[in-house]
Image (cartoon, rainbow, N blue to C red):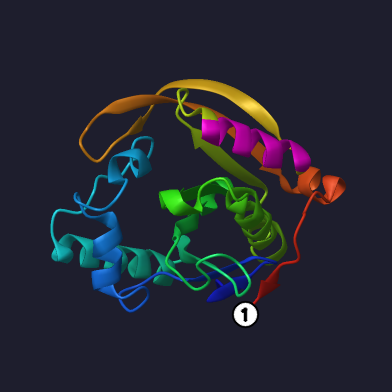
Amino acid sequence: MFPETVLTDRLRLEQLGPENPDPLTFYEHTRKEAPDIEETTEYVSWSPNRTPAAGVGFLENAEESWAAGEGATYVVRPREGEPAAGAFAGTTGLGLDWDRDRGELGIWLRKPFWGRGYSGERADALLALAFDRLDLELVRVSHLPENENSERAITKYVERHGGRRAGLFRNRLTDADGTVHDTIEYSVSQREWREADGAETAVEFR
């Protein structure tokens, strides 16, 4: 159902699972002692992994969700020609709600890969996956109200693809530690996406 690899001009997205990335590499970048981990996880719903086994469990859950058709999660790697080409930069995904004919975008990146425009580039790819390959009607994306960097990035690519801000939703998101947050949400419909044709990068599915 989902392509194992998605290529854009600067990024390579590969299926996330127990063998990719290497579990120890994944743990090294998601553990409590990882460099910049507090900044990395400040506005995401997951908490740093306390043990390598916890990291393996995350990778296994991603593989199970993929097999069940519930969502596609990918490793983000810069392509050749980019700084740190081939490195594990983070993960991104498209969650599926088939009953409502919609998907939901998510991403987190390690701090060395911030500010490069990668969020918008992988959004081009995952919107193409959602609408061209999966024929979904709607894709949503959200951020916490205090996350100004995500607000700028999301607003830019949502508007470029013809979408809109839906508004503030109270008590919408629960963290792994039980903390409840408001979110600001946006959506792009398939019709808006096709009419806008706002992709800034070529996308190839493999």
- Could you classify mark 1 by the number of other residues whose Cα lies within 10 Å: few (under 14), some (14-19), or many (20 or more)? few
Q: Does residue 35 appear left or right of residue 84 in this picture?
A: left
Counting from the top left corner in percent of width and height, residue 121 is at 65, 55
Determine if residue 205 is in view.
Answer: yes
Q: Which residue is mark 1?
A: 206
Point out the stretch of residues depicted in magenta: 149-160
Work out which quarter of the rendered image holds the C terminus and state it: bottom right
At horizontal 29% and vertical 46% (from top left) the residue drawn is 37
Looking at the picture, which amino acid does disc 1 mark? Answer: Arg
Q: Nearer the viewer, residue 56 or 48?
A: 48
Q: Is residue 159 magenta?
A: yes
Q: Is residue 32 above or below residue 160?
A: below
Q: Is residue 92 magenta?
A: no
Looking at the magenta stretch, what is its main secondary structure? Answer: helix
Count numbered badges in the picture. Answer: 1
At horizontal 46% and vertical 60% (from top left) the residue drawn is 71
Q: Is residue 191 above or below residue 4?
A: above
